[in-house]
Amino acid sequence: MMRGRRRPAVAMLVAMGAVAFATAGVAGPARAGTAVPAGAVTYATTGLAGAAPVSGARTVAVRVAGARGALPARAGYPPFEAPGKTLRLGAKGAAVKALQARLKQLGYVPGSADGRYGGATLTAVWAFQKVQGIKPTSTVAARTWRALENPRAPRVLVPRGKATRVEVDLTKQVMVLYRSGVPVLISHISSGSGVPYTEYAVWNGKRQVFSGSARTPTGDYKTTWRARGWHRSYLGQLYNPIFFNGGIALHGALSVPLYPASHGCVRLPMNVAGILPGMLGKGVPVHVRGAFRR
């Protein structure tokens, strides 16, 4: 088993992650009505008498025994004890279910917590590993489990960006949706390949030639129009596209490999594209940064 350090239960406000930990029955508990930053998360321990609520924060209960509790080694995340079992694609069972639940808890999108290690869980594992600085692989072993116990948040690309925004990291091939300043969805992506292309397609009733550089331009944009379900463009089929830079969109695709492969759009796993339209409105800033190194 991999165990994080146990610490005395304390009351503290962590400004960096806009997270408050409130406990009672110890010196200096957080007082009721204490103001916290917008979008903060409160971890209020239970099992201690008289735990005081903290206003303005979403509360996640963390059960502890007596006056001591296992708090996260990295502020902002609830504790997790890894099963420690090496998992490979196709695995089944309780350890897979624990993996899926933890990934979802951290903002990744592993699909249903059904205990089956399939494609949706794989792309969530990739996204997590990339954010943690681990070379992405389908195998979940000791290093990934340790990172799940002590996760780091995605690197903020636009520190002074709006509280609700999308950041696309071309270097890591990761997309993060922030709401109220908190990363609520983190996904693996595949952006523009950078390879010049020439494609022939029937468009507007005529066979036409289309060419370009297959780049995903960096810059600051906003979400514009969208389509529901499969949308046919002159360069292929896009699932639930949300456009943000002319014809460039965030969209689902059947192929989202571990390298940039699109004509310029930001490809997403299908399960991510299925829920993103319900979380991302029109006119939301989209910041694209970085460059992929092959």
Image (cartoon, helix red, strand yellow):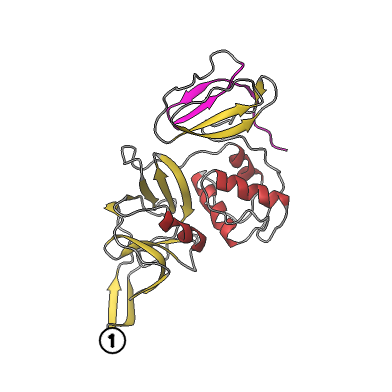
Q: Position of residue 94 (x, y in %)?
A: 72, 50
Q: Position of residue 11 (x, y in %)?
A: 53, 20
Q: Residues within 10 Å of mark 1 (few under 14, many from 20)?
A: few
Please identify the quadrant where the N terminus is shown.
top right
Q: Would you place residue 118 above or below residue 176 in this image?
A: below
SS for callout 1:
loop
Residue 155 in view in this figure: no
Residue at 29 percent of width and 74 percent of height: 211
Q: Would you place residue 244 above or below residue 228 in this image?
A: above
* Magenta-drawn segment: 1-25
Closer-to-camera residue (1/70): 70
Identity of the amino acid at label 1? Gly
Residue 220 on the magenta segment: no
Q: Position of residue 10 (x, y in %)?
A: 57, 20
In which quarter of the view is residue 267 placed?
bottom left
- Dominant secondary-structure state across the stretch colored magenta: loop
Residue at 31 percent of width and 37 percent of height: 160
Residue 27 in view in this figure: yes
Residue at 65 percent of width and 58 percent of height: 117
Residue 8 on the magenta segment: yes
Please identify the residue farthest to the top as the structure is shown: 27
In which quarter of the view is residue 45 placed?
top right
Reading the image, the residue beneath label 1 is 205
Please identify the residue farthest to the bottom as the structure is shown: 206
